[in-house]
Image (tube, rainbow, N blue to C red):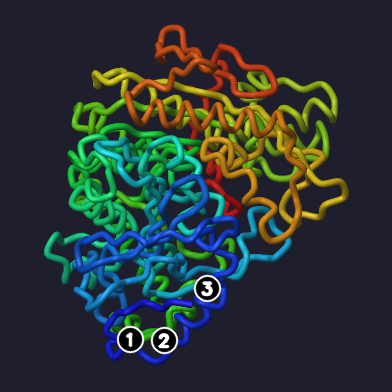
Amino acid sequence: MKFVERTVSRIPRAGRAVLFVIASLVAASPAHAGGVADRAAPRVAVTGGTIEGQPLAGGVIAYLGVPYAAPPVRDLRWRAPQPVAPWHGVLHADRVAPQCVQPQRNVLSNHYSGPEVTSEDCLYLNIWAKPGLKKAPVIVYIHGGAFFIGSGGAALYAGDRLAERDAVVVTINYRLGPLGFLSHPELTRESPAKASGNYGFLDQIAALRWVRDNISRFGGDAHNVTIAGQSAGSMSVLALQSSPLAKGLFHRAVGMSGALIGSAGPMAMRPLARAEQDGVRLQEIWNAKSLAEMRAMPADRLVAPRAPGSPPVGPIVDGFVLPMPIDETFRRAQQNDVPLLLGFTQDEALGGLGKIDGLASYRSRATALFGARAAAFLDLYPARSDAEAQAQARIADRDATMVAAMDAWARAQVATGTAPVYSYLFARPHSYVDGVTITDLDPATAGAYHTSEVPFWLDTLDSFNRYRPTRAWTAGDRDFAAAMADALVAFARSGAPNTRRLNWVKFDPEHPQLLTLGNHVGLGGWPDQRRLDFFRGTSAQTPTPSARD
């Protein structure tokens, strides 16, 4: 078993222990899958030094756990990412790096990805590419997880299947939770940009700069980069499209079920001043007297599971990464004007209306949430029985938390941009193992739930059975995943997702149509615009995507 040939003396003893733990998990890594013939491990010179990849089945080389920035630890905690420190010798890029510090997950939850090694030293990326490519399209995938959990190293996001289609695929880690998005007056004062928060976005931008500077060495085209993400990853894609710091770093964008857009309403981001106040409240909760004390605290004390009433932590309008609200950026035509592929799933209800037992609770909840506008809401989502009330609540939840924002994103791009928008509705339920227990998902009622489209877009269906069997995929599932992955690569290559099997139309705000991706494929209309306008005008606090994704 090979270990990283860095200058080991500069790695703290605890860090060395982490390396040994990671190495013990190598048998579960895609780089060590059986059936791969021994081949010379290719070496590539990148920023910082030389890396050595691992050959996989299908002719793909994986380069896993490649540093794109310095470890954001100690005095670098809550600072913009710094350049990679050069290493000596060869870095054996044969296993994913630890995920960024985050709460751990129940082993019976959906998407459980095996042993979860975490570290504050987590700014690494992974590359999959076939040898011999030249100017291949590049896909950079940004993981979801409500800006609180997740990892670019999860098997769900593995890039080998897309890479087999002659794309170069990159996944990234970025700082999460308070370590990635804390704002604080002291942090603002010490920052050269006079801003704080959005460190996770700065990490993503640093990773894209690494791609710009290095991806040609893997056969990728630095002038044809597609960023893609789901849930918080999709929100990140929109933030990057809106950020002047990301200008020129990507050329197409894919958003799956997530958009922070709108200066008012439930998806509005906090301004810097309010976020700083929330940061002071967190300092009080942590019982720290100063910023220096907060930087000295163990990372796991700062990243606790969220509780109702705790100060919010997440993306903000900081005046630097995001100089203004995202909708204002689009109104001024200052977005990064690139082709978009946007969509959502049919059944992604995230509990915005709370538990609805029947018609009475549906009506009372509408009154509590919308006040004088409750009657208008009930006209748009009418129900005459308990079953209808529960069904309408799920649809309203989806429209409020996902569809209204995705529609606003598409319309904002068409209004002031020149690049086209394509849109979809994913409506294909997963196929489950009989009797499987999943603590945060009921297979009987989940439908096409939030995040369910990801293994089809990335052709990673088998990731769900890697550590325990949960899915009983059919030949039809696998065939459909192949068709969706082909469309994603086609979009990355040309800016249009059309393939022999999937034909798309451009988004037209006057007659909006989307491609339904389900057991039946075909064009259909977006949800009723009056419903979406209702939620864009409301002040009710529907939730952001949960940490399930």
Residue tagged 1? 11
The residue to which callout 2 is attached is: 16
Q: How many marks?
A: 3
User: Where residue 522 sits: x, y (%)?
Assistant: 59, 13
Pointers 2 and 1 in contact (CB under 8 A)? yes
Marks 3 & 2, CB-CB < 8 Å contact: no
* For residue 118, above or below residue 237: below
Q: Which residue is mark 3?
A: 117
Could you say which is closer to the camera, residue 159 or residue 398? 159
Looking at the image, tell me whether mark 3 or mark 1 is earlier in sequence order.
1
Image location of residue 437, percent across then percent down: 81, 55
Q: Quadrant of residue 259?
A: top left
Say what secondary structure mark 3 lies in: loop
* Residue drawn at 22 percent across, 61 percent down: 46
- Identified at 43% across, 59% down, the residue is 39
Instruction: Work out whether residue 458 or residue 453 is closer to the camera in this orientation and state it.
Output: 458
Residue depicted at x 20% and y 68% = 48
